[in-house]
Amino acid sequence: MKLTFWGAARTVTGSMHLVEADGFRLLLDCGLFQGRRSEAMQRNSQFPFPPAGIGAVVLSHAHIDHCGNLPNLVKQGFAGPIWCTPATRDLTAVMLADSAKIQEEDAAYLNRHRPKDEPPAEPLYRREDAHHAVARCRGVPYDEDVEIAPGVRLRFVDAGHLLGSAMVALTLRAGDREHTLTFTGDLGRRDLPILRDPAPVPPGELLISESTYGGRTHPPAEELAGSLADVVQRTFARGGKVLVPAFSLGRTQTVVYFLHQLMSSGRLPALPVFVDSPLAADATEVFRLHPECFDEATAKLLEDDPDLFGGRRIQYTRTVEESKRLNARSEPCVIIAASGMCEAGRIVHHLKHGIEDPRNTILIIGFQAPETLGRRLVERREEVRIHGQFWKLRAEVVVMNGFSSHADRNDFRDLLGPLAGQVKQVLRDNALALFPQLKDRLWKGKGKLTPEPR
């Protein structure tokens, strides 16, 4: 059996891992790499293996850095099934259609503004490519064993990170032996609203674990709610807008949940809150279709108040005209828009219109990859480039990473600790370097720790 990391090694984007056993080639995730535009286009457009030679894809969840390059994989010859949970299948359909639309619109925008001597820009893939990829998705419920190829069995376990997100437990026959492999995908947090907590991590001979926040500890949910209320109140008091770059899937629903609860409890007055994203509106509808993924408290809240994700308190905008009217709006409001790293989408236009107003707040609620506009905002650069022009950063910038749905140091300790003595090797990037005591618990006398993947 052979394992090769082709993405999400020494970085947090572009998840893509190749598993080979007895001639069968299986891809764990096929995500978009996000970063500097030229590097991202090069890495996303060219696969380091022939796509036609991949027998199947196993998809952990529907975030774009895990599923976003599936249309390109299919476009370049992949013809096998894409295995995922039913909720992931439904969310992936929404995410890939939107991603293809953004690819087409970005290429069209660049072509309208490109110098005459430059070749025209081409989208990475188009909407028909996204439709072809979704047609290959096969839904498998949690905790159900299924044979996906001769000698290859799969079981999904709830990862608690996103609606439908799953850890992957694989059993693969190689020669005369069976091998077990566990891929965590993105591990969720415990005690965060909406989704169930992560299930126990399945043991395996080899564990591939994410580690995005392996060296940090997130604040409790109640503390997070108070901090959010403080930011909104402070910004509204000076007559400004709160601009929230957020990925339309997962993070947006979490912020909406917190704002809804703050207003329902009276900790915030009724405020104008806009989710300026057709994708977020569509994704929220998928959330409503899969209550089986919700934790007990959220399921009860939805029974008592079906307005939990919007309606009376939260307004969803779909058209470009509605989005433009938000920029012209002079009254204070909260605007939540994609993309979460400020590299594309409507948030870029809102930032362009609001970044030089000191009354406004840019609320960063997630990790910002190097070379992205979001990272430059976090670094509080004096000037940032948006749509080819430089703008003064005069708005307040607030970073609240506690909204992350990724496991933190304590979650990793409690989720991976029970595997001590059951796992021989763990492939990792930076979490265990930051968490050496966990490494000692997992592998003392149980083989060697493999080198950091490249």
Image (cartoon, rainbow, N blue to C red):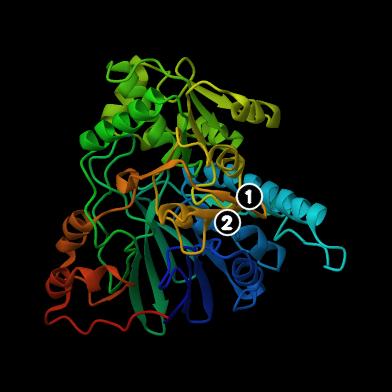
Horizontally, is 324 left or right of 82 in the view?
Answer: right
Residue type pointed to by label 2: Gly
Q: Can residue 160 be seen here?
A: no
Pointer 2 with pointer 1, Cβ within 8 A: yes
Residue found 34% across the figure and 80% down from its top: 452
Q: For mark 1, what is the residue?
A: 99
N-terminal of the two: label 2 or label 1? Answer: 2
Q: Position of residue 429 (x, y in %)?
A: 34, 72
Q: Quadrant of the N terminus?
A: bottom left
Q: Nearer the viewer, residue 301 or 147?
A: 301
Residue under label 2, please give it: 68
Q: Amino acid at mark 1?
A: Ser
Residue 146 in view here: yes
**Which percent across, then down, holds residue 173?**
40, 76
Query: Above or below — where is 235 with respect to 94?
Result: above
Q: Is residue 40 left or right of residue 423?
A: right
Point out residue 447 in the picture as x, y percentages from the top left corner.
Answer: 20, 84
